Amino acid sequence: MSNLSSASSSTPASPSLLPSPLAFLHETVRAVFQDGPERSAGKFVALRQLVLDGRDAPVNFGSNLHAIDVGQIRWNACELVAGTVLVMASPCDRIQNRQALKFASKTLGSLPTMKTVTIVPSADLGEYFKVAKKAAVDGRVGELTVLGVNLVDVGMLERRQAGEDLEYTSFEHTFVLGIGREGFRMWSVWGGCEYQLDDIATPEGARLRGWDEGKEFLKTFKVLTAGKGTWSEEINKTYDTLFDVDLLNMYSKGKRRLPVVPDYKPWVRIFGINDVKTTNMEKLKCYPLGPRLRRSCEKLGAQSIVSDGNFHGEI
């Protein structure tokens, strides 16, 4: 297995060397969230319903898609972006699509039980990343691996199960990593603060990161998940470094948020999708590829998947 430090370059590869799966996944996710809250929320709901209904037909993201009241969903919930990326990356299979959606959905029963947390060891993201990087950089064709990562707040889980006071801010967070030959991307927003899902569609949203940055990210994440006791300034700084969220100084609607749950007990679970193909994203109805998207894909080095003039999703 390759160590993180064994990469030949600390910066992302040039666009012409990018394999199409990671570039295509990035553009597909951007297509969901770039049209503003109402239409983008409609796209997410349509995709979610497609999975829940178990239909084989692709969801129609065309002009006849109805916008919905964004108040019906939490537009800054990390579960929405994580669920979207995982469903897009998963194979076109009813069971696997539902498993991908469920991993990031509390309403579908994704929360682990205290029994699970007690019996199952916390997952090691570094090991998952190492395997994914090896699959990406070894061999003639680099494979794309997508990892859904759920940082579980065990202290809050205990309180919920015991029926105790829940008037605290939880540090629980779900995000997704895509690891390809050119580097990796992270899809992450944090519910309850100023970050919105349409930030994913900005140039900095899920930006391409190099292997040296990956090494630092994993080192910092390991420090965060190894901590125990109470939420401290040091833990808060580590969390802020990873997710750009300062829980000790967060405000909501002009008011300081509730204090962080006092018992700091992190636990990690991971949902992995190996060898992600561009064909996995055929859950979106094909539309003629517009000139702007064609230029964007070609710039990302995805010429091989746009030569037929179609893109799986409307941009």
Image (cartoon, rainbow, N blue to C red):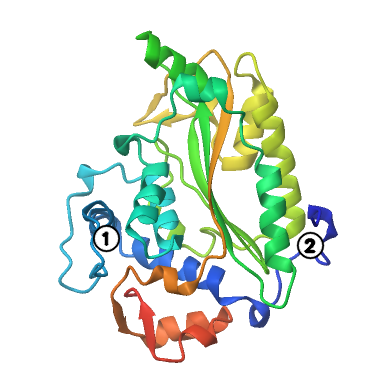
Is there a contact, CB below 8 Å, between mark 2 and mark 1? no
Q: Which mark is residue 83?
A: none
Query: Given the image, on which type of amino acid does mark 1 rest?
Result: Lys
Can the viewer see residue 229 in this picture? yes
Q: Secondary structure at mark 2?
A: loop
Residue 81 drawn at (x, y percent): 41, 51
Q: Amino acid at mark 2?
A: Ser
Instruction: Write the residue at 43% across / 29% down.
Output: 251
Which of disc 1 and disc 2 is earlier in sequence? 2
Split into 4 quadrants, where in the image is the N terminus?
Answer: bottom right
Is the residue 201 above or below the residue 119 in the image? below
Q: Residue furthest bottom?
A: 308
Along the viewing direction, whichever of 226 and 217 lies nearer the viewer: 226
Is there any visible trace of residue 259 in the rendered image?
no
Q: Residue at x 66, y 48 (%)?
A: 128
State the residue at coordinates (74%, 58%). Answer: 211
Percent x, y for residue 256? 43, 23
How crowded is the residue under tag 2: few (<14 C-alpha within 10 Å), some, or many (20+)? some
Q: Is residue 191 above or below residue 211?
A: above
Q: How many marks?
A: 2
Image spot of residue 315 (x, y percent): 34, 75
Which residue in the structure is indicated by mark 1? 43
**Along the line of sight, which residue is nearer the eye, 143 or 7?**
143
Residue holding disc 2? 10
Q: Quadrant of residue 240?
A: top right
Is 29 drawn above or below residue 165 in the view shown?
below
